[in-house]
Amino acid sequence: MNKINLIREIREIKNQLSYSKNIGFLFGAGTSCALGIPNITQLTENVERSLTGDFLKCFTIIKEDLQSASTKSINIEDILNQVRRIREITNNREDKNYLNVCGKDAKDLDVEICNKIYKIINDKELIAPLDDIKRFFAWLDLQNRDYSKEIFTTNYDLIIEKSLEETTIPYFDGFVGSYEPFFWQDSIDRFVDKNDITKNWIRLWKIHGSLSWFWKENKVIGAYSIVRSGKIGDLKKDNNELVIYPSKDKYDSSRKQPFIAYFDRLKNYLISGELLFIFTGYSFSDQHINDLVFNCLRTNNRLYAIVLFFKDEEVENLYKLSSSYLNLSVFGPTKAIINGQLGEWEFNKDDLKPGESSDSFWDEATNSLLLGDFKKLVNFLILSSGKKDTIEVIANGK
């Protein structure tokens, strides 16, 4: 296997971080997992363990049916997707069923699963340490101010929102209002100009939904819209139905759903011109996102993407899909894809300049790259910036 000079590639990353005017990120489950939030596999297991009675019976029927037709492990999003298909074809009716699951039971199971997801993630959020994510956004807030900073995430949790608000860094997510903020499509479709006061706000696009999104029925037209809420005490008491991946057909078809609008925003952002885009904590398991990203890599030769993986297995899997993309670099613990070639890291301490340290990116004890760990990545970004003291002040809210 090819040998890839690690020090050379790390210097290249540092140069790009220093000189790129426009930097965007896509956060996957790994970023929240690093802070103690369960990943999709853990969440699926936790939800299944928490269900009882008819809920568990219907859940098991649907899961086993999906698994029988798939070679990959079925997760909670797959199950929710199928539950919502059953709701659609049965129109939520008790006298119609699919797989011996009637429409009413599917509707009740949908709500119950979402309630369980909310409780499981919310309980973990309450004890999650926010120091590293706050330091990340303090670093990001100090980057070039000629462009808005855009964060796309597949995570439902509210870790990002809590961190931004604790550090008083302004952000925008496409919702407007104060009592029940509603989704405003026009705010997503347009890029801000240089005179816009919100230009320097961080843009947060939650492409799989959020624990703060809920369905609101418009009884006049018989359709639903999505509103964003703040702190929720009791989902069942408030009769809120959570909005997480995937979207539902009951949404008002005259207005674009946040999910669709965010995907359009991601596409337009990736083809908009010169851009450094970094994937962290994302395993490339969502084919919809993957297709969009690869199309943009082909379309925009001024787009340069960096993928940071926690496992070498993820590097090997992505190589099968990405070897033709020279504007994509993939970094794993011991393996990488550089210029379309799969190789192994070669670390030579003699390549370091006087005073240069590898501690922020390389573990000599295990001979592995650290940047696939979100916490280590944050530390690397801050040390590479030369603004550590300023960043710590912002992160601490001083």
Image (cartoon, rainbow, N blue to C red):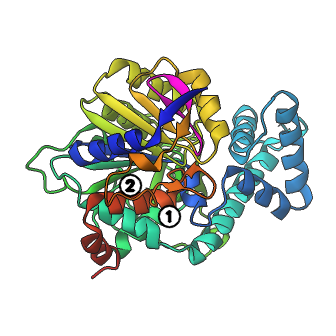
Q: Which is nearer the N-term, disc 1 or disc 2? A: 1
Task: Give the residue at x 49% y 33%.
Answer: 4
Q: Tell me the residue that label 2 is attached to.
A: 182
Q: Nearer the viewer, mark 1 or mark 2?
A: 1
Q: CA distance from mark 1 to mark 2?
A: 17 Å
Tell me if residue 295 comes above or below residue 313 in the rendering: above
Q: Tell me the residue that label 1 is attached to.
A: 158
Check disc 2 and give the amino acid type.
Phe
Q: Is residue 26 magenta?
A: no
Location of residue 165 (image quadrant): bottom left
Q: Residues within 10 Å of mark 2 (few under 14, many from 20)?
A: some
Q: Nearer the viewer, residue 101 or 385?
A: 385
Q: Is residue 146 left or right of residue 181?
A: left
Tell me if residue 247 comes above or below residue 240 in the rendering: above
Image quarter where the C terminus lies is: bottom left
Check disc 1 and give the amino acid type.
Leu
SS at mark 1? loop
Would residue 179 be seen by someone viewing this image from the given angle? no
Image quarter where the N terminus lies is: top right
SS at mark 2? strand
Q: Position of residue 291 (x, y in %)?
A: 51, 25
Magenta stretch bounds: 333-343
Tell me if residue 397 comes above or below residue 100 in the rendering: below
Task: Give the residue at x 20% y 46%.
Answer: 147
Q: Residues within 10 Å of mark 1 (few under 14, many from 20)?
A: some
Q: Position of residue 89 (x, y in %)?
A: 73, 31
Task: Give the residue at x 91% y 51%.
Answer: 57
